[in-house]
């Protein structure tokens, strides 16, 4: 992985549509993107790779980060198109998907693989940390958030330890008992993390949202 920390937002447009986006809307989306990137970087570490990003807005009810093609998609209701101003959903969408961007894991991996479940849990954790009034009702999401909260109480700097030997990105993909023990987590929490994340799944499709 190149030792370059540069994320460039190349374009913001509608997905599969010819409608144009007002420049003022593009500007506040861009500003919020870099704001959330900075906040997430402070928590998880800076992305140490270069990537040119595109943001797509869609009328469909979907939100995702595509690692292969480097784009983020979120719903058009994140924007108040009458006033051309952002809704609170914009912060939620970007704070979540940017964690996937920093982690850089492959898009569309099944959630039954613990590392990718952990990544999704951290993405939800980041959003709830940003927006404390956001409440998730799915048991697997709550399990993920609560596991991370408890793990951080036991090992406050755990998020900075979820990195590879070159300090290049969160090493969620290394999730196993040996690493959790090395990083200072107790037996009970290690078992709980592994059990919950192995069973976790947030969507029937088994893909990132």
Image (cartoon, helix red, strand yellow):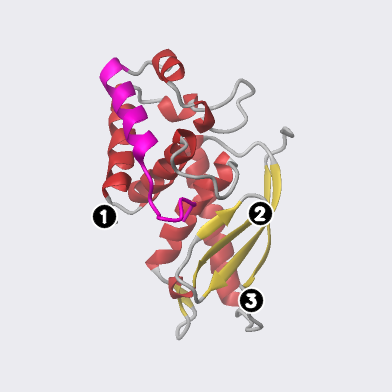
Secondary structure beneath disc 1?
Answer: loop
Residue most toward the bottom? 82
* Residue 79, x across and y down, in percent: 46, 74
Up/down of 196 relative to 28, above or below: above
Q: Are marks 2 and 3 in contact (CB under 8 Å)?
A: no
Q: Nearer the viewer, residue 92 or 64?
A: 64
Label 1 belongs to which residue?
A: 135
**Mark 1 residue crowding within 10 angstroms, few (<14) / some (14–19) / many (20+):** few
Q: Nearer the viewer, residue 157 or 150?
A: 150
Q: Which residues are magenta?
A: 186-209
**Mark 3 residue crowding within 10 angstroms, few (<14) / some (14–19) / many (20+):** few
Q: Which mark is residue 157?
A: none
Label 3 belongs to which residue?
A: 16
Q: Are marks 1 and 2 in contact (CB under 8 Å)?
A: no
* Residue 74, x across and y down, in percent: 50, 65
Q: Earlier in the sequence, mark 3 or mark 1?
A: 3
Image quadrant in which you'd find residue 90: bottom left
């Amino acid at each position: 992985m190149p030792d370059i920390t540069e994320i460039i937002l190349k374009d913001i447009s509608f997905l599969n549509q010819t409608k144009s986006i007002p420049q003022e809307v593009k500007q506040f989306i861009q500003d919020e993107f870099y704001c959330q990137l900075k906040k997430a970087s402070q928590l998880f570490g800076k992305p140490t790779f270069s990537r040119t990003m595109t943001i797509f807005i869609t009328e469909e009810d979907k939100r995702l980060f595509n690692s292969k093609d480097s784009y983020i998609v979120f719903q058009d209701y994140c924007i108040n198109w009458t006033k051309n101003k952002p809704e609170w959903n914009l912060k939620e969408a970007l704070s979540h998907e940017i964690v996937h961007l920093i982690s850089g894991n492959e898009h569309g991996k099944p959630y039954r693989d613990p590392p990718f479940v952990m990544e999704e849990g951290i993405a939800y954790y980041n959003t709830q940390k940003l927006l404390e009034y956001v409440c998730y009702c799915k048991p697997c999401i709550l399990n993920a958030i609560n596991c991370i909260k408890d793990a951080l109480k036991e090992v406050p700097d755990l998020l900075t330890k979820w990195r590879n030997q070159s300090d290049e990105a969160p090493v969620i993909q290394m999730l196993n008992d040996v690493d959790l023990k090395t990083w200072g987590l107790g037996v009970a929490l290690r078992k709980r993390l592994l059990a919950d994340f192995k069973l976790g799944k947030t969507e029937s499709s088994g893909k990132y949202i």
